[in-house]
Image (cartoon, coloured by chain):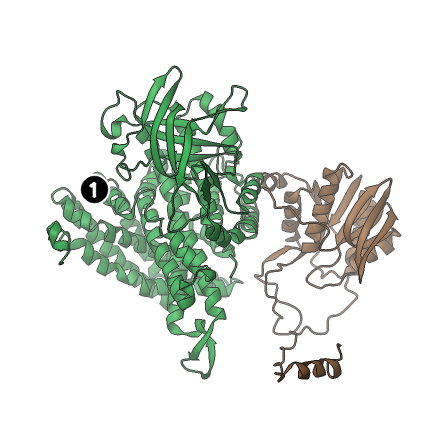
Chain colours: A green, B brown
Amino acid sequence: MSAYTAPLKDMRFVLNELAGLSEVAKLPGYGEATPDTVDAILEEAAKFATGVLDPLNHSGDEEGSVWKDGKVRTPKGFKEAYRLYCEGGWSALSLDPEWGGQGLPKLVSTPVTEMITSANMSFSLCPMLTQGAIEAMLLSGTEQLKKTFLPKMFDGSWTGTMNLTEPQAGSDLALVRTKAVREGDHYRISGQKIFITFGEHDLTENIVHLVLARTPDAPEGVKGISLFIVPKFLVQPDGSLGERNAAKCASIEHKLGIHASPTAVMVFENATGYLVGEENKGLAYMFIMMNAARYAVGLEGVAIAERAFQRALAYAKDRVQGRDLVEGAKAVPIIRHPDVRRMLMLMKSQTEAMRALAYVVGAATDMALRHPDKAMRQRNQAFVDLMIPVVKGWSTETGIEVASLGVQVHGGMGFIEETGAAQHLRDARITTIYEGTTGIQANDLIGRKIAREGGATVKAWLQHLQQFDAELAKSKHADVAQMRKALTEGTAAVADSVEYLLATFGKDIKAASTGAVPFLKLMGIVAGGWQMARAALIAEKRLADGAADKPFYDAKIASARFFADQVLSQASGLRTSVLAGGAGALALSDEQFLAA
Amino acid sequence: MKALVSVKRVIDYNVKVRVKSDGTGVETANVKMSMNPFDEIAVEEALRLKEAGVVTEVVVVSCGVAACQETLRTALAIGADRAILVETDVELQPLAVAKLLKAVCQKEGPQIVILGKQAIDDDSNQTGQMLAALLGWPQATFASKVVIADGKAQVTREVDGGLETVSIKLPAIVTTDLRLNEPRYVTLPNIMKAKKKPLENLKPDALGVDVAPRLATLKVLEPPKRKAGVKVPDAKALVEKLRNEAKVI
């Protein structure tokens, strides 16, 4: 099986040329993110991801996490890998220096997270959830709670979880039933939570659960949900671990993918919990973290796509089968066959486009947080809010497509587990579901992010695309010209769709909603095409300046050209799907769906 | 006591090296460069000696172009205390490096100098030995174990057919073999700290060393392509060929 190689050259290109690392490094507090330091961080993160995490990916999938008598054993090697991860200080990369973090920008933590996820997606989920729990506590925890839990969570000694879902409350958290009854300075938590990632494991001595629950007099629905900290072991005033809390893991799920990541059923029986923030505001706190969580899952799409691409590429270079269409005589590696190349380019170009968009949104997140000018902060925040559902929805849907192509490139061997191609497809499959399904992302996009503000941000972005077109027009490169044409058509498709959605959302929300996912995909390929066009333009310029790395820049332009012809060309078809509204989809009675 | 470790910037071991079309050398433009793996082992050993309380300061030295600073920063991120770059654009050969290191040793006064046994680019395996001769210090090459006590280094060496243990008086030269240790993963806080550690820049002239090449490279060629194998009908024919043609049994 082929090993993972960190795509550092492309990462650096995207960081420096597309996402504007040097601009981010100028923001207050980010002065440490100089090019040489970021280079060193990427190099060392790559060594860790390839040397420690990648070798555990396939074995972790085969062995899986195992539940016995309320305890969970993670696969062989995970404990040691987690220890090295914490010792390396990777857990605190972008966290607040006040609590022991390194305080680096999100733009820098993004490629590091991508590498860790590419190397071992199951492993990556544990730190990701801990990060989410830390952010929730930083936002709304009391000083006492922060002092008790944060230092141990920052250095990775304790991990965190998010307990949202219950059997009857999945995407609809209004239906949460877990109870929280006040008792002095704490609460008693009772109920059952499911789908709790790393809810129980043997990597650390303690686990800090963040749990959504209702107090007895809470209002109905989403406005009556509060957020609690429920540690696995209670913490004594001196910081040492005390009594085992009544937060037990009843079992773990048998899943399609991410086998090494234990997905726990948690049972709380009068467990001791501490309120985070105020009562009944739990969901609001969750929403503040929603962007970060959805962004992180979008990045998983990029990471899995990269890994699946690399595996398929290695196989295509190695597998000898069939003759070259022109040269004939001898059997050749399958990478010489045009359709295999098409698949590889579909994988490569879409992965590059998704990476570029994700990193650009990562940079905008830093700008929105730290830019000294308020108008700049607001403008960047609006852009981030608009693009989060696109990064989440489009990158994960495309991640699955790329992982599926990876199986296809392998032919019959792709269907056999030993090549590892199938694992990526199985692992990728959850990404369009958790942290809000693609459908939910698409509804968020057309509703909250577009209709609610009359399309202001998306129109500003379209205007930016038109200004960018003037730059593209200056190019002398035939491939860039082709990209320009495709991007112009794509931009028009988005503009038409936005007009339609704005006109329809208020009066026929069902018709508008039927087009939501096609619209999200349209936004994805046009935003991705925008980044690929920028990349091609920069590559053309670097080549004209006599850049030393000609093969890389030539490949970038070819990748953009391919994206224009094979991906962006779908824009007008997606527009048709959006504008068709509910016709067909909304026509049938429930009975008519099955002609049995 | 002070330990001095030399580190060389070489083509990364993962890179498939290509010969330049004019045969003057190998292609290094746009090729990923890293620290020579044997030197990583040398840095790691010095740090372990420091952590064991034997060594008080670890100084890393690199000789070559300005970009060697990156290699030195890596060594600082692994944990070395400070770095010295002897900067020159001249192509450095082992004797020149040994002379430069001798000058640095005379300036710094280390009790132990640890070098990789060879660099993976030119495979010379000369610098450590030459440095020992120039300084008149004892040397223990190809170390797979180093124990320091009572002003002496007891070094286990990997030699043909087994292990040899020698005892040498400090100050001394040690060159590392592959099995001496397994270098650690660099931590994020140490990467951040490395930026603030001192990196001194020296020039060969200031050290009074003439680094002009003594050897001329005539040409560099790709290794010959492997010839096709031969099929033998049975084991007997194989034994026959191994005995009479290859003369290996």
Q: Position of residue A590 (x, y in %)?
A: 13, 50
Front-lying residue, B217 or A296: A296
- On screen, residue B230 above or below B214: below
The count of marks equals 1
> Do we see residue A351 in this rendering?
yes
Q: Position of residue B62 (x, y in %)?
A: 71, 51
Q: Position of residue A145 (x, y in %)?
A: 45, 23
- On screen, residue A424 above or below A325: above
The residue positioned farthest toward the top in the image shown = A184
Type of amino acid under label 1: Ala
Residue A382 falls in image quadrant = top left
Left or right of B171 in this view: A263: left
Local crowd size for mark 1, using a 10 Å CA cut-off: few (<14), some (14–19), many (≥20)? many
Tell me the subunit letter for badge 1: A
Rendered residue at 44%/26% (across/down): A245
Rendered residue at 45%/68% (across/down): A316
Quarter of the figure that contains the C terminus of chain A: bottom left
> Do we see residue A371 in this rendering?
no
Left or right of A353 in this view: A46: right
Left or right of B64 in this view: A261: left
Left or right of B6 in this view: A67: left
Label 1 sits on a secondary structure element that is helix
Residue A222 falls in image quadrant = top left
Q: Position of residue A104 (x, y in %)?
A: 50, 39
Front-lying residue, A133 or B35: A133
**Which residue was labeled with disc 1?**
A451
